[in-house]
Amino acid sequence: MFTDTHCHLEDENFSGDRAEVLERAKIAGVDKIINFGSTMQSSAAIVELAENFSQLYGGVGIHPEEIDDFDENSCAKLAELAADKKIVAIGEIGLDYHWEKDSERRLIQQKIFIAQLDLARQLDLPVCIHDRDAHGDTLKILQSEGKNLRGVLHCYSGSLETAREIWKMGWFIGVDGPLTFKNSAKLPEVVKAAPREMILIETDAPYLAPVPYRGKRNEPAFVVEVAKKLAELRGETLEEVAAYTTANAKNLYRLK
Ligand code: NI
């Protein structure tokens, strides 16, 4: 069995065939799926989905590209949503300097990121981090503001050096479709060096479909392709990868 530890099934791309997508996941052996919010509205939708489908769990949070959605009431509203039993994390939160070039707005991203780290600590929930082209500041903030927190750098795209710092903190890296791409750069080197208890697999569906589905809509069933690539690169069997990544997901997110 596999766990897809990061996707967005509330996305409108799934509004026509969500039940079929979940059925295909089940057939592929993906029996647990964690959706992550990026706005208040998507976070609320994720709570509702998790209530309606037994295999779905969720994380609630405001994504760094959605900072205009954050106001002084947001943490209280997120805490209310997070009170649901199927909500297992705060996320996705973090920094995105790829799409945000303005230095003032990057500072706002940092403030909102730190506020949500504080919220996770108050609620005793793990966090799911989005870090795009902001590896230095993300690591700095986690090292200074991440005390007594656990979490994952989702869709990991940093260096092996940064990954080693993450593992030292006891945090996970999330690996997705880009591992299967020809131009996957540093990622194969990172996953080969990763301790097995520090790796999670994810799809980030509907984005980033792995080979051989690259360019199509991604879905949780395809997380098996990421697991296959991990097995190949690390010289392990698919069964081993399934077993330890599932155990890691259960451990971080306290899945029942
Ligand atoms: Ni995502």
Image (cartoon, rainbow, N blue to C red):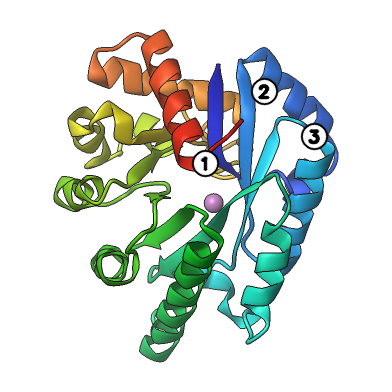
Mark 2 lies on residue: 25
Answer with mark 1 or mark 2, whichever residue precedes in sequence: 2
Query: Whole-Å distance between the Cαs marked 3 and 2?
Result: 13 Å
Relative to 44, say whether 88 is above or below.
above
Tag 3 secondary structure: loop
Number of dots carrying numbers:
3
* Residue beneath the point at 53% across and 69% down: 119
- Report the quarter where the N terminus lies: top right
* Residue beneath the point at 63% across and 87% down: 72
Q: Residue 212's x, y, as percent?
A: 50, 23
Tag 1 secondary structure: helix
Mark 3 lies on residue: 53
Q: Residues within 10 Å of mark 1 (few under 14, many from 20)?
A: many
Q: Residue 107's x, y, as percent?
A: 39, 85
197 and 222: which one is in front? 197
The three-letter code of the residue at mark 1 reads: Tyr
The three-letter code of the residue at mark 2 reads: Ala
Give residue 253's mark.
1
Tell which tag, 1 or 2, sits nearer the viewer: 1
Q: Residue 221's x, y, as percent?
A: 61, 24
